[in-house]
Image (spheres, rainbow, N blue to C red):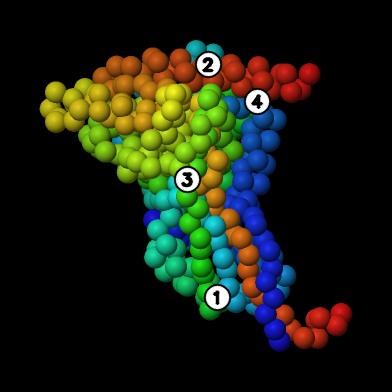
Amino acid sequence: MHELSLASAVIDTAVRHADGRHVAAVHLRVGHLRQVVPASLLFYFEHVTRGTPCEGARLTFDEVPARMRCEACGHGWELRDLQFRCPACDAATVEVVAGEEFEVDWISVDQLEESCTA
Amino acid sequence: MHRVKVRVVEDALDANSTLAQANRADFDHHGVTVVNLMGAPGAGKTALLEQVVGHGLGDVRLGILEGDVEGSLDADRLARLHVPVTQINTAAGFGGECHLDANMVRSALGAVPLDEVDLLVIENVGNLVCPAEFRVGEDARVMVTSVTEGEDKPLKYPLMFRACDLVVVNKVDLLPHLDVDLELLLYRIDKVHPDVPVMVVSGRTGEGVDAVRHWLRELHEMKTAARMTTVS
């Protein structure tokens, strides 16, 4: 449901970094905890890119697994079954090390030859 | 023409975060503490606010910024209680946004009498997913979940339950009529967000609302003390 807004945010970021060039591909890193539905994001991305420098761009992503670390005992674990308490010492003071990303990792842009000589 | 790869490595919501920080700076400048109130449609966000506003927060002056897709039904309910209420309709945005973002709040700031308010509650659009993604410049986030929504919601919407600083479990007056297991709901809230403060209330009878009022007062006192330290 939030994928429409997220698609718009991705396009804004890509366009800013494209510096006026056409964007051919956008690659994201999406954390497992972001509750992003890939099919939904792709659907909105295609619609929202129309009429922008990202029109026709291919959207790909890597999912980043959720990794946790206990601030009390230092135990690290990969999150499964939404167990946010430390499985080793039961502490509540845990930190999400990875899995909350929603970042544009890289884009590929079409570079005109003449701009290379400038 | 050839194709080149550009490294970006930037949070796609950075633009929103920047605007949220600008909002926060404005709020700080006016000494206003801001709470982002979130929850599903019908969870009882407005009813809880009516109870809080009705009893007041002592000398802490309340203000409300009301986000809805359409209409001003909630704002009208709250305006009867004689606090400044400002309405934002998200339908004017791109197809009726399902949440408030920092930019929408920013555009409404001119209409909020910040000098007459100590604690501003921003009632977000009813939704259990999107509002958790977008900071608006708040000091704290409070979510309302109601027992009628069932015990499974923390496991289905962990992002929202993890994004908040306080969970208010509403409509406990209805428990005798429901098959819902309150203990299981509380266990699951603690599972996805260990040690988050939880308050069990009824927006209808007012049961438990004093604890929420106390929490809001303490939040404002804490933020005010923190601002004084920063200034001096």
Question: Marks 4 and 1: in contact by CB < 8 Å?
Answer: no
- Determine the CA span between mark 2 and mark 3: 33 Å
Question: Marks 3 and 2: in contact by CB < 8 Å?
Answer: no
Q: Residue at x 63, y 65 (%)?
A: A106
Q: Amino acid at mark 3?
A: Ala
- Determine the CA span between mark 4 and mark 3: 37 Å
Front residue of this view, candidates B116 and B227: B227
Q: Indicate the secondary structure of the residue bearing disc 2.
A: helix
Q: Amino acid at mark 2?
A: Glu
Instruction: Work out whether disc 1 and disc 4 sit on a shared chain.
Output: no
Q: Determine which residue is flagged by label 4.
A: B31
**Up-down relation of residue B180 to residue B68 (above or below):** above
What is the x, y in percent for residue B52? 41, 22
Q: Residue at x 41, y 20 (%)?
A: B212
Looking at the image, tell me whether mark 4 or mark 2 is earlier in sequence order: 4
Which of discs 4 and 3 lies nearer the camera? The answer is 3
**Up-down relation of residue B62 to residue A38 (above or below):** above
What is the x, y in percent for residue A5? 49, 57
Q: Indicate the secondary structure of the residue bearing disc 4.
A: loop
Q: Amino acid at mark 1?
A: Ala
Q: Determine which residue is flagged by label 2.
A: B218
